[in-house]
Image (tube, rainbow, N blue to C red):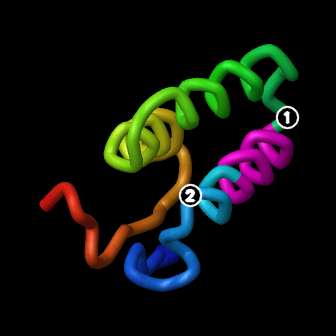
């Protein structure tokens, strides 16, 4: 399981957007889905970005956020 410290550089919104994009390309998601997920991640605040990230990847990638501001 990979751990991401949200207080460090891994918690930067652009880092998380890039990570999401990389995973979606790795899993061969179609372009429309990738754009939709990234647009949704960018559509609101940081907590929303984290929620969309979790909704999109928690069932297919083993990761854990530490220093999560939502908790």
Residue 26 is inside the magenta segment: yes
Q: Nearer the viewer, residue 41 or 44?
A: 44
Pinpoint residue 11: horizontal percent, then vertical percent. Answer: 49, 70
Determine whether the residue tagged by mark 1 lies in a helix, strand or loop.
Answer: loop
Q: Residues within 10 Å of mark 2 (few under 14, many from 20)?
A: some
Residue at 83% x, 48% y is 26
Q: Are marks 1 and 2 in contact (CB under 8 Å)?
A: no
Task: Pick out the residue farthest to the top.
Answer: 32
Task: Pick out the residue farthest to the left.
Answer: 71
Relative to 67, is 45 on the left or the right?
A: right
Please tell me in which quadrant of the rendered image residue 3 appears.
bottom left
Pinpoint residue 7: horizontal percent, then vertical percent. Answer: 39, 81
Residue at 31% x, 77% y is 66
Give the residue at mark 2.
Answer: 13
Q: Comparing marks 1 and 2, which lies closer to the viewer?
A: 2
Q: Main secondary structure of the magenta part?
A: helix
Please tell me in which quadrant of the rendered image residue 14 appears.
bottom right
| Magenta region, residue range | 18-27
Residue at 56% x, 58% y is 13
Please tell me in which quadrant of the rendered image residue 40 appears.
top right
Relative to 34, is 14 on the left or the right?
A: left
Give the mark nearer the N terminus: 1 vs 2.
2
Q: Nearer the viewer, residue 64 or 16?
A: 16
Give the residue at mark 1.
Answer: 28
Residue 64 is inside the magenta segment: no
Q: Residues within 10 Å of mark 1 (few under 14, many from 20)?
A: few
Q: Residue 60: which disc?
A: none
For the C terminus, the quadrant is bottom left
Pinpoint residue 28: horizontal percent, then vertical percent. Answer: 85, 34
Relative to 16, is 7 on the left or the right?
A: left
Pinpoint residue 29: horizontal percent, then vertical percent. Answer: 79, 28
């Amino acid at each position: 399981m990979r751990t991401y410290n949200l207080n460090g550089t891994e918690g930067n919104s652009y880092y998380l957007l890039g990570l999401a994009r990389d995973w979606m390309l790795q899993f061969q998601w179609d372009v429309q889905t990738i754009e939709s997920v990234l647009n949704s991640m960018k559509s609101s605040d940081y907590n929303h970005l984290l929620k969309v990230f979790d909704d999109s990847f928690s069932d297919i990638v083993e990761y854990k956020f530490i220093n999560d501001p939502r908790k």
